[in-house]
Image (cartoon, rainbow, N blue to C red):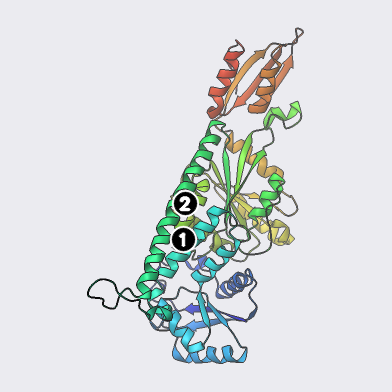
């Protein structure tokens, strides 16, 4: 049985109570939404939530966070419902966690601990498990002194003088320190492997498009819609943890559509990533940096927002905050970030009109989609094709009838704008190519003994 508590701290003098820089009022998460999210986090790992409550904290107490009266009030709830676990949706110092456990005679978990538990259960790949373990050990290391009561034992000493020897606490600290060092070495191997994979893609090369967004914004559903994959997509927080990548063929654009078919469309690599969340533990941002390197290196970043959510604006600020920690400026002039406003199928007619007006007012106009129904997906793909094709170069080439292999290569690796056949069977082609593939194009044309001509844009 689990009880979920969301402390609501009073803010004074324009500063946030937890010492973080205060954001504008319209970017703050409402207490009711925080409670709903906290209960959702608890249920994400199948906890039996008996109740969830907002707890007003006028002045944080160093020993217990909340006042003694509130502690006693909650103790009565714990006893009445036979609560075994109390989740406090706020960072707790080790001494606060220990004192609350003693007062309530129940296990206490703060927000960071809860998110770590979810990550621990959901990670499937070797890399994901290593990253979670690293974050968990960092978290535990700061809590050894006051939360592990069994660590007061001591082992026998060595040497001529004997003495008290190494305490269990010191031994466990050393074991954690050694394990952290070992995990970091293993993760370094993982990073090198990822770099090799990225190097392989760079030689192809296909542009990388990364999906990011607040947890449960619909990224995995959109990923499945775009790729035809079967990534786990549930109405659940942190349903996706390990990164997934698939190849996607974008539609041809402009005059190329008249040639029929999608064979000339650009290929991209689409990457689905872990969802972000407010107050994401710093240790997790650091631990998952290798995973999020796909985002850092991406050619385009699609920020998927649940536009039907009441806290959509605040969630946007949380995601952009994590992106800044990764060195990505969402407000940069040449930003790679494009917003996708998802779940428009959850809006009524009046809300749709309001959202459409809001989208038109955006400097970088977002694409409105429903990953569940497919509405707006064609527009999203076309927008991606145009975005990635901004720097394409246009060429003209006459391909002789006997160079069928070269013609096939052009269809696979360029965007064919125009193709006409002459009486002798030769094809007069005009096409666009990504500058990154220009070298491969020139090599293919040279092998055929032909030469490129600039084509009109």
Circle 1 residues within 10 Å: few <14, some 14–19, many ≥20: many
- The residue under label 1 is 134
Q: Nearer the viewer, residue 308 or 436?
A: 436
Q: Is residue 348 left or right of residue 414?
A: right
N-terminal of the two: label 1 or label 2?
1
State the image coordinates of residue 401 (x, y, percent, origin top left).
Answer: 72, 11
**Image quarter hosting the N terminus:** bottom right
Q: CA distance from mark 1 to mark 2?
A: 10 Å
- Element at label 1: helix
**Image quarter hosting the C terminus:** top right
Answer whether labels 1 and 2 touch (C-beta < 8 Å): yes
State the image coordinates of residue 345 (x, y, percent, origin top left).
Answer: 73, 57
Residue at 69 percent of width and 22 percent of height: 408
Q: Nearer the viewer, residue 275 or 46?
A: 46
- The residue under label 2 is 187
Figure check: 351 above or below 30: above
* Residue 95 lies in quadrant: bottom left
State the image coordinates of residue 404 (x, y, percent, origin top left).
Answer: 71, 16
In the displayed image of the protein, which residue is found farthest to the top?
424
* Residue 47 lies in quadrant: bottom right
Residue at 46 percent of width and 51 percent of height: 186
């Amino acid at each position: 049985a689990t009880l979920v508590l969301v402390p609501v701290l009073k803010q004074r003098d324009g500063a946030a109570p937890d010492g973080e820089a205060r954001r504008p009022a319209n970017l703050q998460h409402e207490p009711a939404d925080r409670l709903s999210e906290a209960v959702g986090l608890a249920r994400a790992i199948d906890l039996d939530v008996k109740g969830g409550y907002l707890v007003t904290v006028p002045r944080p107490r160093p020993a217990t966070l909340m006042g003694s009266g509130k502690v006693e009030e909650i103790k009565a709830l714990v006893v009445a419902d036979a609560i075994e676990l109390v989740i406090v949706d706020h960072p707790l110092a080790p001494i606060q966690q220990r004192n609350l456990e003693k007062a309530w005679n129940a296990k206490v978990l703060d927000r960071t601990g809860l998110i770590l538990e979810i990550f621990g259960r959901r990670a499937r790949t070797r890399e994901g498990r290593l990253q979670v373990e690293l974050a968990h050990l960092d978290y535990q290391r700061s809590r050894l002194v006051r939360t592990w009561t069994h660590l007061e034992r001591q082992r026998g000493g060595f040497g001529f003088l004997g003495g008290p020897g190494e305490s269990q606490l010191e031994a466990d600290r050393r074991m954690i320190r050694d394990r952290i060092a070992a995990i970091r070495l293993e993760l370094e191997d993982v990073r090198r492997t990822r770099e090799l994979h990225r190097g392989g893609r760079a030689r192809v090369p296909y542009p990388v498009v990364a999906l990011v967004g607040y947890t449960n914004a619909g990224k995995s559903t959109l990923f499945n819609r775009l790729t035809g994959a079967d990534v786990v997509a549930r109405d659940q927080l942190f349903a996706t943890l390990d990164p997934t990548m698939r190849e996607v063929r974008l539609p041809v654009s402009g005059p190329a559509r008249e040639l029929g078919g999608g064979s000339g469309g650009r290929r991209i690599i689409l990457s689905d990533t872990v969802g972000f969340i407010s107050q994401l533990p710093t240790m997790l941002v650091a631990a998952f940096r290798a995973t999020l390197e796909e985002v850092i290196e991406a050619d385009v970043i699609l920020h998927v927002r649940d536009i039907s959510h009441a806290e959509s604006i605040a969630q946007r600020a949380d995601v952009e905050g994590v992106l800044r920690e990764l060195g990505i400026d969402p407000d940069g002039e040449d930003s790679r970030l494009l917003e996708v406003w998802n779940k428009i199928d959850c809006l009524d007619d009046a809300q749709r009109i309001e959202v459409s007006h809001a989208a038109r007012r955006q400097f970088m106009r977002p694409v409105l989609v429903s990953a569940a129904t497919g509405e707006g997906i064609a527009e999203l793909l076309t927008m991606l094709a145009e975005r990635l094709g901004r720097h394409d170069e246009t060429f003209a080439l006459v391909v002789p009838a006997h160079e069928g292999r070269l013609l096939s290569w052009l269809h696979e690796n360029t965007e064919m704008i125009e193709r006409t056949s002459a009486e002798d069977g030769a094809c007069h082609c005009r096409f666009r190519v990504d500058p990154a593939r220009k070298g491969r194009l020139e090599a293919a044309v040279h092998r055929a003994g032909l030469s490129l001509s600039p084509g009109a844009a």
